[in-house]
Image: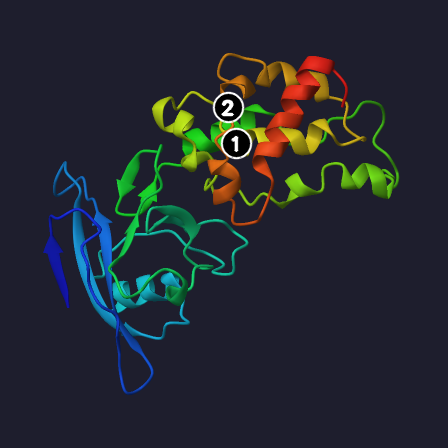
Amino acid sequence: MSTAVMEQPGQSGTAEPTTSGMITVTFRIRRFNPEVSADASWEDFTLEIDSKDRVLDALHRIKWEQDGTLTFRRSCAHGICGSDAMRINGRNRLACKTLIKDISPEKPITVEAIKGLTVLKDLVVDMEPFFQAYRDVMPFLVTSGNEPTRERFQSDEDRARFDDTTKCILCAACTSSCPIYWNDGQYFGPAAIVNAHRFIFDSRDEAGEQRLEILNDKDGVWRCRTTFNCTDACPRGIEVTKAIQEVKRALITRRF
């Protein structure tokens, strides 16, 4: 059963073990429905669940068994699609990769939408500004000449140069953890810069200078204040801050 509450997260609670090896956990979810109220509120849901289950499993249980109006995104449920990024206990995480036992289930587990993007309903945000920034950095290979009749060869060393930034799944966990992005949605954000990095340092690409000029804008790479929030938030382990610094260095030296 669910109980609507107006308190802020952080109140104490308990995760009680049961005879079946399950635990009783309270999930405190920030709800928002613009058709009902202009204000968001916190709502508690208590359920018995295996501590080795994921937060996504708990959200499914809540939606299927307690409140069908609960709204969130998810797709593959295996940490590949990036759909279910949300703030769990105050940190950006993928709900499908976060085990309940790893996030202090003895207290209420808070779940809310990621910051910096307009909340549409409950845990769903408007991703269009995020994807527009991604599109703006030209996230595709640019070459000249005739279309090749076979693949473009690349050495292992050249491929390794941008290997880390190929891992991005566009979940927005890094961008929505950035305090600069929270205060100014015009900033390209870490994810867009990471995806620009992936092509700037690709030896087969010919549009590196063009991408660098795009990121040299007042809302580009220089807005980064190197807080490392983005690196900490990335569920794929990408060294986001390092990639941003490499783009800055390329802008100064024009070597990439």
Identify which amino acid the numbered label 2 is placed on: Cys
Q: Residue at x 37, y 61 (%)?
A: 55
Few, some or many residues within 10 Å of mark 2 (<14, 14–19, 20+): many
Nearest to N terminus: mark 2 or mark 1: 1
Q: Position of residue 120 (x, y in %)?
A: 28, 39
Image x and y of residue 146, in percent? 85, 27
Does residue 68 show up? Answer: yes
Residue found at the very far bottom of the displayed protein: 19
- Between residues 149 and 11, which one lies in front from this camera angle? 11
Q: Quadrant of the N terminus?
A: bottom left
Front residue of 15 and 77: 15
Residue placed under numbered mark 2 in the picture: 224
Q: Is residue 39 left or right of residue 104?
A: left
* Label annotation for residue 110: none
Q: Position of residue 154 (x, y in %)?
A: 86, 39
The quadrant holding residue 114 is: top left
Q: Which residue lies under the disc numbered 1? A: 190
Quick one: quadrant of the C terminus?
Answer: top right
Query: Left or right: where does residue 107 sit relative to residue 87?
Result: left
Residue type at mark 1: give it. Answer: Pro
Residue 151 seen anywhere in this rendered image of the structure? no
> Image height check: is 213 above or below 25?
above
Which element is circle 2 on?
A: loop
Q: Is residue 108 left or right of residue 216?
A: left
Against 117, residue 97 (above or below) is below
